[in-house]
Image (cartoon, rainbow, N blue to C red):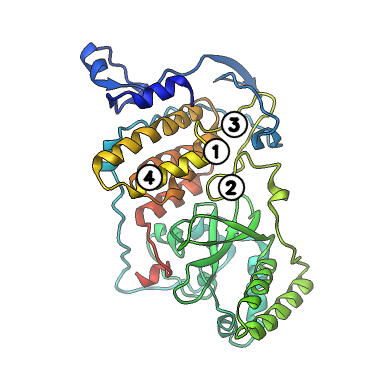
């Protein structure tokens, strides 16, 4: 953190809720409220016909961002006019989200005809070919849901539409159907361990109009970490069962039988069972984020436009989250939020200067904290950044999720 930011954090004055956008020159106001340091000196840069401004940055060849091969396109360099993350700590606390209760109609009518167009309309993304092929293979078995239950798995999320289990309801509710507490918009659950477990498997994609990059897992009862498993659902199920087989002799035989079936289906359908490793993804991501799966945004290595690092390390940010979670008084919370505010404000400035990846990173990290005090800032950062990145479907998903955000093992909209 720069000297200016350190002085700003230590300043005992109240934070001006208008932040960098404050136009007040009144001496009484300036003596009572503190304001973030002014933006650094800028220089103009030309990108594919667009002139934008940004501060000078010294490149670091060891940074993940410097290895990115993704270039900034001419459509994604418009600066943001938002300065939404500059509210004072007390304002942030007073605006903590009040999550809505899910309400379904008294008389439900169910979708009885499903095609890819309806799937896209309800979930705002296209499901990949392996999703439909896996379901087709399951249907070739007698009582396939019972078959899955023998290995402690159940189909969830978009599979419920194929199973005829989804009613016609408010469109927002499809976006939270089986969306677990720590699932960002990029992650969509399709399978889970049965009963009280919050372990689930799902597709991870970088943009809503792209097919998934890999299939991963998360256990929301533990943390926000997303663990890549395989390139497709066949490989993910096979490798998951391979691990489960070693845990208990009581389910080992059932796991092996299911693994044999999945291996046969994958071979017949030309899907590999290989493990997905982050090494394959590393050249494309600009930063890992707290969930570990990384984010991909347009980044120009020559001009360094698209992403800059946050002013604090992940370790420091996680430490502030932990302190905020354990704070027992309003004054403690205000102090920690004052320390966190420069990180949020700096990220907002970065977005203004076309480093959209920084806005996405801080938004995801705030979301991954799981703290209600930080949800307003997470929502503001993510909605703004997704819009600038033209990932509007993700914007709708995060708005619906934070509107109804819940903890627990049963995230079906039918059970609330």
Q: Quadrant of residue 177?
A: bottom left
Q: Report the mark closest to the observer, 4 or 1.
A: 4
Q: Earlier in the sequence, mark 1 or mark 3?
A: 3
Which comes sooner in the sequence, label 4 or label 1? 4
Q: CA distance from mark 1 to mark 3?
A: 10 Å
| Closer to viewer: mark 2 or mark 4 | 4
> Which label is found at residue 207?
2
Residue 66 at x, y percent in the picture: 68, 32
What residue do we see at 44% from left, 43% from top?
A: 319
Q: Is residue 387 visible?
A: no
Query: In this picture, is 2 found above or below 75?
Result: above
Tell me where residue 61 appears, x and y as whole percent.
70, 30
Specify which label sits upstream in the sequence, 2 or 4: 2
Q: Which residue is mark 3?
A: 306
Q: CA distance from mark 2 to mark 4?
A: 33 Å
Distance from the alpha carbon under mark 2 to that under mark 1: 9 Å
Specify the quadrant that holds the C terminus: bottom left
Mark-to-mark CA distance, 4 and 1? 32 Å
Residue at mark 1: 389
Of residues 229 and 109, which is closer to you in this image?
Answer: 229
Residue lying at 41% horizontally and 30% vertically, measured from the top left: 342
For the residues labelled 2 and 1, say whether their Cβ atoms are less than 8 Å apart. Answer: yes
Q: Of residues 3 and 21, which is closer to you in this image?
A: 3
Q: Which residue is tagged 4?
A: 323
Residue 399 picture location, percent across and down: 40, 49
The image quarter in which residue 23 lies: top left
Tell me the CA gap for discs 2 and 3: 16 Å
Dot 2 surroundings within 10 Å: few (below 14), some, or many (20 or more)?
many
User: Badge 4 local density, few (<14 within 10 Å), some, or many (20+)?
Assistant: some
Callout in the foreground (2, 3): 3
In the displayed structure image, the side of residue 381 where residue 57 appears, left or right: right
């Amino acid at each position: 953190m720069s000297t200016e930011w350190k002085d700003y954090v230590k300043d005992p004055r109240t934070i001006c809720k208008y932040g960098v956008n404050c136009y007040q020159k009144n001496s009484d106001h300036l003596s009572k409220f503190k304001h973030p340091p002014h933006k650094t000196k800028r220089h103009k840069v030309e990108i594919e016909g667009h002139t934008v401004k940004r501060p000078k940055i010294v490149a670091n060849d060891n940074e993940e961002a410097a290895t990115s091969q993704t270039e900034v396109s001419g459509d994604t360099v418009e600066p943001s006019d938002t300065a939404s993350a500059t509210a004072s700590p007390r304002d942030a606390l007073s605006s903590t989200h009040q999550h809505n209760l899910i309400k379904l109609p008294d008389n439900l009518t169910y979708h009885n005809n499903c095609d890819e167009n309806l799937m896209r309309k309800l979930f705002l993304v296209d499901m990949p070919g392996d999703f439909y092929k896996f379901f087709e293979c399951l249907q070739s078995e007698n009582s396939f849901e019972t078959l899955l239950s023998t290995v402690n798995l159940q189909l969830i999320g978009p599979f419920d539409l194929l199973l005829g289990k989804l009613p016609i309801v408010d469109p927002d509710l499809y976006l939270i159907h089986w969306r677990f507490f720590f699932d960002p918009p990029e992650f969509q659950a399709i399978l889970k361990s049965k009963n009280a477990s919050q372990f689930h498997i799902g597709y991870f994609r970088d943009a809503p109009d792209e097919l998934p990059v890999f299939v991963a897992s998360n256990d929301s009862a533990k943390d926000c970490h997303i663990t890549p498993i395989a390139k497709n659902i066949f490989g993910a199920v096979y490798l998951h069962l391979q691990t489960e087989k070693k845990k208990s002799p009581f389910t080992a035989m059932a796991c092996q039988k299911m693994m044999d079936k999945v291996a046969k289906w994958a071979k017949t359908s030309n899907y590999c069972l290989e493990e997905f490793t982050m090494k394959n993804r590393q050249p494309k991501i600009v930063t890992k984020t707290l969930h570990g799966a990384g984010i991909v945004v347009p980044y120009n290595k020559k001009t360094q436009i698209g992403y800059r690092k946050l002013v604090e390390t992940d370790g420091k940010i996680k430490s502030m989250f932990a302190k905020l979670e354990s704070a027992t008084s309003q004054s403690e919370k205000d102090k920690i939020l004052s320390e966190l505010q420069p990180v949020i404000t700096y990220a907002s400035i970065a977005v203004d200067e076309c480093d959209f990846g920084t806005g996405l990173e801080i938004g995801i990290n705030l979301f991954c904290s799981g703290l209600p005090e930080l949800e307003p800032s997470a929502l503001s950062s993510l909605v703004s950044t997704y819009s600038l990145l033209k990932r509007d479907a993700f914007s709708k998903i995060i708005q619906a999720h934070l509107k109804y955000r819940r903890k627990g093992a049963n995230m079906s909209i039918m059970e609330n």
